Image: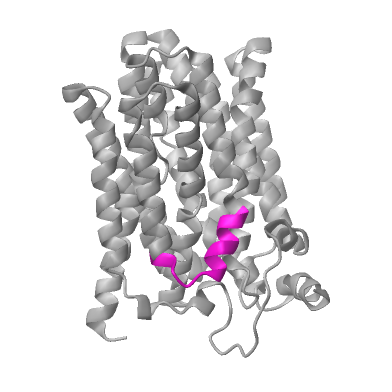
Amino acid sequence: MDAAGLRRNNLSLDGLNFFLADVRDGLGPYLAIYLLAVHHWDPASIGVVMTVAAIAGLITQAPAGAWIDRTRSKRAVVAVAALLVTLSCIVLPWTSSFTFVALTQAISGVAASVFAPAIAAISLGITGPRAFTRRTGRNETFNHAGNACAALLAGGFSWLFGPVAVFYLMGAMALGSVIAVSCVSAKAIDHDVARGLEADHDHHVAQPSGLSVVLHNKTLLLFAICCALFHLANAAMLPLVSQKLAQVNLHMATPLTSACIVAAQLVMVPMALLVGAKADAWGRKPLLLAGFLILPIRGVLYVLSNDPYWLVAVQLLDGIGAGLFGALFPLVVKDLTQGTGRFNVSLGALSMIFGLGAALSNSLAGFVVQAAGYSTAFLTLAGIAAVAFILLLTMPETLKTHDNETRKPLNAALAET
């Protein structure tokens, strides 16, 4: 590929990650605000709809990864999924039916499940494994920048025009993502390399189920458990912080929570750049350990003070932990599946496993808060994060082992199928 073509593909991937940042999560927290403020739904109904969307997206993660491994129309998949997510959201101003809203959000969750494996596959297919680290860091950088920008625009537009403004913002971002992915050269994507095969492979590799891939690779299974515990500990922390902020100062709770989100996303940008620049030189494990270590520290720091600005300052540490994890996650999966043709199905399977941890996090924290208070809940989450960190210590450095021992269990299983 010539320099001009490479530059165009890089800029197109930058744009894709920036614009999809708002689309890939659907309406997210804005859905609850809209249904409560405009349609006057009760909190229980809102919670059920959001749970339906989360479960729909969760159970389709592994199949979505397997589909991305198989298809050679990855750009079209991203474009169609972006349009489906947007259409399922922009119809909401014209309906208040619980069944219809739940159905549209389930469709949104299913469609959004293809974004992560599709972007990783397109990136790997264009750059190859050697340049994948830097490209992944760049992907995460533009994703976090897009999240921060979208949050700022959503807040400003909602203040000026009401909650309905977020629908039009999502439509604009979706259009931008479709244009960006269409600018990626289809010929530049090596679809075999994109699924984790070597460039000079001479055989076809069949597709196992996503969970089979994880269960037959002990290192990948250990990493999946670490990821699940990380998200079990992490997902509930911001909601708990928001609740404490509301107790201290109800009027300032929403703007301070928004500030937490935007600032954390901005902190994630340099973390993603750091991974892209140094993960091949330093290895994955030191950076992963740093990200995992931040989480139990955050949990303990929250109990030291109820001051709103202290809580916001501690929440900024999420930008370090989640920023490092988000950029390193596809790199570790690539290391452990390189040469097997199972990259995207493995990515989807692990996303499903840690998504389950995230889904359980708020329920666990809620029960602990009700029984013993916020401090106990934060310390419980910190304890879970500490277990994840200890387990991660036992995992080998994947950068050095993906060509040797870590591929043997999976390759042996493949030989039997």
Relative placement, left or right, of 6 versus 189 is left
What residue is at 32 percent from the left and 75 percent from the top? 185
Q: Position of residue 56 (x, y in %)?
A: 57, 40
Up the image or down, 199 lies above or below 300; here it is below
Let me know if residue 67 is in the magenta part. Answer: yes
Q: Position of residue 364 (x, y in %)?
A: 66, 25
Relative placement, left or right, of 312 versus 305 is left
Relative placement, left or right, of 347 versus 118 is right
Q: Quadrant of the C terminus?
A: bottom right
Total number of numbered discs in the rendering: 0
Numbered range of the magenta stretch: 62-75
Q: Quadrant of the N terminus?
A: bottom left
Q: Nearer the viewer, residue 198 or 140?
A: 198
Let me know if residue 274 is in the magenta part. Answer: no
Corner quadrant of residue 339: bottom right
What residue is at 43 percent from the left and 60 percent from the top? 77
Q: Position of residue 238 (x, y in %)?
A: 48, 28
Q: Main secondary structure of the magenta part?
A: helix
Q: Nearer the viewer, residue 280 or 22?
A: 22
The answer to whether any part of residue 277 appears in the image is no
Corner quadrant of residue 58: top right
